[in-house]
Amino acid sequence: MAPNTPNSSNHAVCNSTACPSAIEKPDHLNTGTFHQIKDFFGKILNTDDWPPRWHCGNWTDFHGWLYILSDASIWAAYFAIPFLLIRLIVKRKDLPFNKVFWLFIAFILLCGLTHLMDVIIFWWPAYRLSALVRFITAIVSIFTVYALYKILPLVFTLRSVTELEAEIEKRRVIEEKLAASEFLLSEAGRIGRVGGWELDVILNKTTWSKMVFDIYGLPYDFAIDENDMMSYFPEPYRQTLKDALNRAYAEGLKWDVELLMINAKKNTIWVRSIGEPLYDEKGALVKLRGVFIDIDQYKSTEMALHKSIGLITQSNQQLKNFTHILSHNIRNHANNISLVTSLVDTESLDAENAELFEKLDNVSKGLNATLDDLSEAIKIKENTIQSEIINFDALIKKVLGVIALELTTSNTEVELYLQDSYVNFPPIYLESILLNLISNAIKYKMANKNPHIILKTYKNEQNETVLECRDNGQGIDLDLYGGKIFGLYKTFHQQKDAHGVGLFLVKTQIESQGGRIEVMSSPGNGTVFKLIFSESSINMN
């Protein structure tokens, strides 16, 4: 039998005009709304009032099955989508807008069910049930639209996939940098033997980094909250640490103390404990945190250095005492020799003895001069002279005034190029330095040239103040005498009045204030002395 051929069942059958709309309604359908609703739900599965859809209208096989297969395919897709969504919701507990997803699942299921009902009605005309399903679908659809409308502003605030990818890339870069920083911090802590710790005052729970466990010589799973960690510190260091913690609790004070400890491996080491209290917004103490450092190597070096300094200080003091005693005793003998020579009547001596006495007198005077030089050098080494702000121009002119006669007699020309005007230095030392340098330039002049001296002040590349004294004198062979040029009683020219004291005093005076002296010279080309002060130039212009 063809699908569109009416069968012999009790179902109503459309007439040949394909279900015309002008069919007169039975009497029970012309009642009031309440009775219609009651009749509707009472006969929800009753199909006597309609024929199957195959028998209503002029369906061809192709048209009918196209309709049926299309609705069946839509129903299958509609039923598959909710199962995929349910799986997504179950797998992703953190999925946003969870309720809206469930509404969409119900909406899609019901939409699919309406298409399934259209397929079923071709054979089972349950139009009342179909209408109910469609009504329920309409209600769920309305709620779904409303819910979607409500969350739409929130959806607009969500970042796009491109933005999320950019954020993920940015976080990846940051995480790589953090990992690198954490590695460097960890390595720095390991190499420097520095560990961090934190005490939660509220929970009474202590947290240590691995390095703190290493310093204590304990395993990483050691129960630090259940043991007395103070027992690793002998007295009086234990009390020192307790006092620091008590002040932190009571007064909110930070601490930084050095302690001696005996760790779990029975090693006695020096450690440094640094910590501070942490308060919440209400001012209540919530945590103590800080660092714990193994300083045993540095402390041992420091103690050894202090011991060495003590020994050096003691040796220096003994040397000073010896120097003073030696100088005093020799001076007594020298003075006695001078006194004896002064009492001798040279006119009563014969020529040979008079000559010997003259030599003895010269030796006595030389000995006293040597003692005076040594005494001056010792005073420079021992005494600390107060520095003052010196005006180069004023002081140089003062020195030139003192030796004006010597400058005039020797036809010496002095040029000044003072770029820096001031320096912080003892005036008495600078006067002595200038007198020695200028006097040497005149003393060791070239035989065929008038002395020409240039005095400069300027700043070098290290921003240090430099006083430069340049002359056109005989010069010094630094290859031959460079290591001896500032030695006491070292002379490099055949001058009768050369004593080898001036440059020794210059070097001693500049170095006593933390400065230094440099020299450039060669035979026949003069000499340049550079006095480099430890204080930077002072601009008072």
Image (spheres, helix red, strand yellow):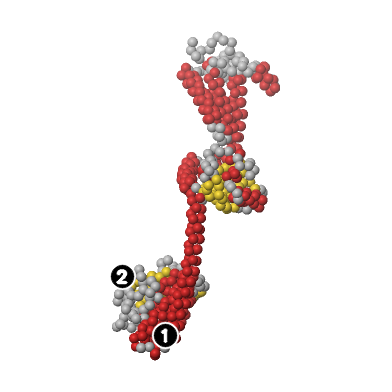
What's the mark number on residue 404?
1
- Residue found at x 47% / y 45%: 183
Q: Amino acid at mark 2?
A: Leu
Q: Nearer the viewer, residue 532 or 459?
A: 532
Q: Which residue is mark 2?
A: 480
Residue 81 in the image, given as x and y percentages of width and height: 52, 27
N-terminal of the pair, mark 2 or mark 1, is 1
Mark 2, residues whose alpha carbon is within 10 Å: few (<14), some, or many (≥20)? few
Residue 134 in the image, given as x and y percentages of width and height: 59, 25
Q: Please say if 347 is above or below 59.
A: below
Q: Quadrant of residue 456?
A: bottom left
What's the mark number on residue 302?
none
Mark count:
2
Residue that lies at the very extreme toward the bottom in this rendered image: 347
Mark 1, residues whose alpha carbon is within 10 Å: few (<14), some, or many (≥20)? few
**Secondary structure beneath disc 2?**
helix
Q: Please say if 366 is above or below 288.
A: below
Q: Amino acid at mark 1?
A: Ala
247 sits to left or right of 480: right
**Secondary structure beneath disc 1?**
helix
